[in-house]
Image: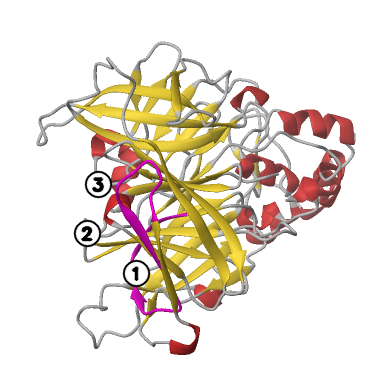
Amino acid sequence: MDSAGGNSGKLFDEMPPRSLDRGCPRSPSPAAMEHGFDRHCVVLGGMPKERSRLELDAGVSLWAGLQPDILGIVLHFLPCLADRARMRSVCRHWRASANGHVLPPPLPLLMLPGFKFSSLSDKGDLMPVRCVPVPKEVAADDLRCVGSFHGWLVGVTPNKDRSDEYNRDADGDCFLVNVFSRKVIRLPQLCHMRYNFPAYSSKTLRIINGSGEVYFRVNDIYTMSLCNVALSASPDSRGKYIVAASSDHKCASKLALWQPGMISWHICAGVDIDGPRDLTFYLGKLYVLQRYKIRLFAFEVGEDNGGLMVSRVKRCLSALPLHHPYQEGGAISCNMVVWRGELLLIIRHYSDNYRDREVLKVEVFALDVNTNPYGLTEIHSLNGDCIFVGLGGCKSFPAGLHHGVEGDHIYFVPDDWKPYDTFVYSMRDGKMRSFAVKLLASEFDVDQLSRDFPVWLLPTE
């Protein structure tokens, strides 16, 4: 991004600048003049007065005289990426001056169906929705977002081959796209129906601390429809990164792995790891969590001549602590997040009435990965940070770096067509409040069989 040598402003280049001080009119940017914005000013009588181009140019030159240190202070009071981009768009001097400041990361973006997005505001609400400019090479009518890592999104499109009824509703293309640079990295097709017998291989691993097995196949045929995706590192990093994807096509649950250089997905399956899953990488391992059963598995992933290799699968957790009031009864939904070097387990407890279900309680546990099985310690503070939970992965964010942004909150957005799962939970007092219900409801005018759910994106400015 701009302050780090990137180009974060591209996403917001079409936005008209907004006043940095709502109580004081400002001169428009050259871009605004070119597009016809802000051609009037307000005089004492309240009537607009037409400005000449000379007056506009003079106003811009006055704004350009602000010292870079002052601009840096202003930038620190703008936690939203869109507001920072608007400030940079005022003039070339402001844009150049902004590059020299190290800023805290901007507030998260929420990617909505149709590759639209909304910025989180410093008040904890969502700002107006805008469209993401998708590169032409991957643009499609039914484009879905299934995961994110920093400035990268994972996108999928429907299978183009409609002749086979079984594969008709599967996914086809899969790719990584950087929202800010618009760089595209193509991943293997998600519907692969050609055998590669010379390169085919398979193996079976018994689950340590469990009674089941996990089956692995390389260069086999497969049909997938992705639910969520996790990355081990940014594609911008110099080292290798791994993409882990959870698929549930026609109730055939699969876990798929890929890294650069591989021509097809490495497929994993097994009864013990079936069902809706949350995925995350932590300390060099892939963690797979069965979301509705509190079953946590650790996959040790290495390399061999064929690319990725899973050498060990271990069940790390299978129940809540003894004497826990919710251990036996009630519906639950679980997620994982890496927070300040620790792996956290987030559990939502629901009422038993399915038709009129509501969230009863939210619990957060720190996992002790050095015990067998893993230990659980309930925590009641995030030290001023916030956590964002969604199907495309959970993110932690240092909200305390921004003045006026309230911390120790967990933001939940829908991940399975559950309107009651759109809320904010306070770690400080255990209270819950609704979150952007009207905005999300208006954006979810899609088929309820769709898997197009909101995905949190954390820009890395």
Residue at label 1? 224
Name the quadrant containing residue 106. top right
Quadrant placement of the C terminus: top right
Nearer to us of marks 3 and 1 is 1
Query: Within 10 angstroms of label 2, few (less than 14), some, or many (20 or more) residues?
Result: few
Left-right relation of 384 to 363: right
The kind of secondary structure element at disc 3 is loop
Instruction: Report x, y in % for residue 221.
Output: 36, 80
Q: Which mark is residue 9?
A: none
Range covered by the magenta-colored residues: 206-229
Kindly report the distance in space between the C-alpha atoms of the residues bearing marks 2 and 3: 9 Å
Left-right relation of 133 to 372: right
- Please say if the residues under marks 3 and 1 sit with CB atoms less than 8 Å apart: no
Residue at label 2? 449
Kindly report the distance in space between the C-alpha atoms of the residues bearing marks 3 and 1: 21 Å
Q: Amino acid at mark 3?
A: Trp
Q: Is residue 415 above or below residue 323?
A: below
The kind of secondary structure element at disc 2 is loop
Left-right relation of 100 to 258: right
Is residue 202 among what the camera can see?
yes
Residue drawn at 20 percent across, 28 percent down: 358
Query: Within 10 angstroms of label 3, few (less than 14), some, or many (20 or more) residues?
Result: some
Report the colour scheme.
secondary structure
Name the quadrant containing residue 87. top right
Instruction: Report x, y in % for residue 364.
Output: 42, 24
